[in-house]
Amino acid sequence: MYGTVNGVPAPVTAPIGVVLARTAKTAGRAFDQALAAAGGSQPIWQILISLKTRPAANQRELADAVGIQGATLTHHLNGMETAGLVTRRRDPGNRRVHLVELTDHGEKLFHRLAEAAIAHDQRMRKGLTETEIAQLAGLLHRLAANVTDTTHERDRTHPNSDAQEG
Amino acid sequence: MYGTVNGVPAPVTAPIGVVLARTAKTAGRAFDQALAAAGGSQPIWQILISLKTRPAANQRELADAVGIQGATLTHHLNGMETAGLVTRRRDPGNRRVHLVELTDHGEKLFHRLAEAAIAHDQRMRKGLTETEIAQLAGLLHRLAANVTDTTHERDRTHPNSDAQEG
DNA sequence: TATTGTTATACTCTATAACTATA
DNA sequence: TATAGTTATAGAGTATAACAATA
């Protein structure tokens, strides 16, 4: 299908990016439905996971953990606070920092979403062995690492280019 | 982390859905940037692939192939037509049907995006063998099949009926 | 001035419902 | 009536830029 394009050698197998994107779209939509049925959404689920498992020093770290911008996190936290899932209060030690904490309602939602996520997982894993799942996770991790890796990007280690502020 | 939740047995490995979602998000964003730099986007790329490789009888089939609703496809086709990538004309044999055809500009964009997609793929595949990629594609395909499978939806009265695999 | 977070605004993708054109 | 597609509208998620509060 992509034998060669302008002389660029094509992958021997189908583009893994296409397979990944399609699979993620399909699986993501099914997951959306499962989470929605349990009263949540993917960003809420990611935020709850982070709150439960990571000691984020501030919202910036929380946003990074979830993979969104700070303003986007604020957007979700506003909704979650309105829904009674979290509270925000200023850190007495550094009043710039807003401490985000789960309410009981938030805890309960976390557990409901965890159940939904586990059920979704079990459905997806059906017919696959533990070994295959571990292989898959490992391979996905390596793909992500290749894409996260920044060594290919324009070299930003030279201060000459942009560090000449007045 | 998910040892047990309300007695539901947890997966032994980390939830593959989480790994998949995170990987897809990371890879998808990198892909977005690559396509944007080449003048495209993921939906445009999917539509172009379908137009080039599938003989869609009508827009409904095209939308299905891309995985979106008809109205959503219309939205993208409007933009693509404005951008001079495709033309739409009525099928003389059945004037309800609108034939979508690539313009030269559309063909060129397809090739540019194909190059970008291949480059993106090669970057992601770095360090992985052909065998591993083939494994990964196969495993993803099986995950998607599990999620696409609708047999679980009709009869939810026997929760244990699918506990055994053949 | 720098850091932390919020507000204002806008963009992309997607969907459903109502509509037009054709059969 | 049924089919193919479009238009109108809306909602979710995301982002950037400007802002306020705090240090």
Image (cartoon, coloured by chain):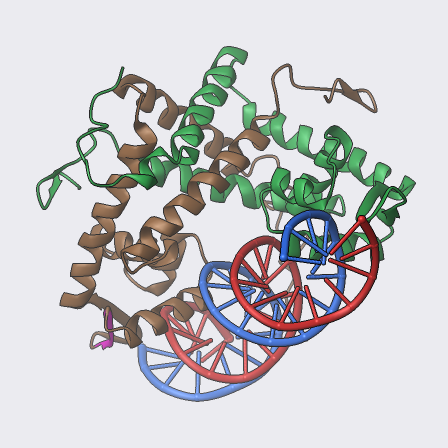
Chain colours: A brown, B green, C red, D blue
Residue at (87, 51) in percent of width and height: B84
Residue B115 on image: x %, y %: 74, 31
Residue A89 within the magenta-colored segment of the rendering = yes
Quadrant into which the N terminus of chain A falls: top right
Which span is picked out in magenta? A86-91
Residue A106 on image: x %, y %: 20, 64
Residue A111 in view in this figure: yes
Residue A21 on image: x %, y %: 54, 37
Q: Is residue B13 above or below residue A165?
A: above
Residue at (28, 44) in percent of width and height: A117
Residue A27 on image: x %, y %: 43, 39
Residue at (82, 20) in percent of width and height: A7
The answer to which of B59 and B14 lies nearer the viewer is: B59
Q: Is residue A63 above or below residue D8?
A: above
The answer to which of B23 and C14 lies nearer the viewer is: C14
Residue B128 in view in this figure: no
Residue at (91, 40) in percent of width and height: B104
Q: Quadrant of residue D12?
A: bottom left
Q: Is residue B156 above or below residue A70?
A: above
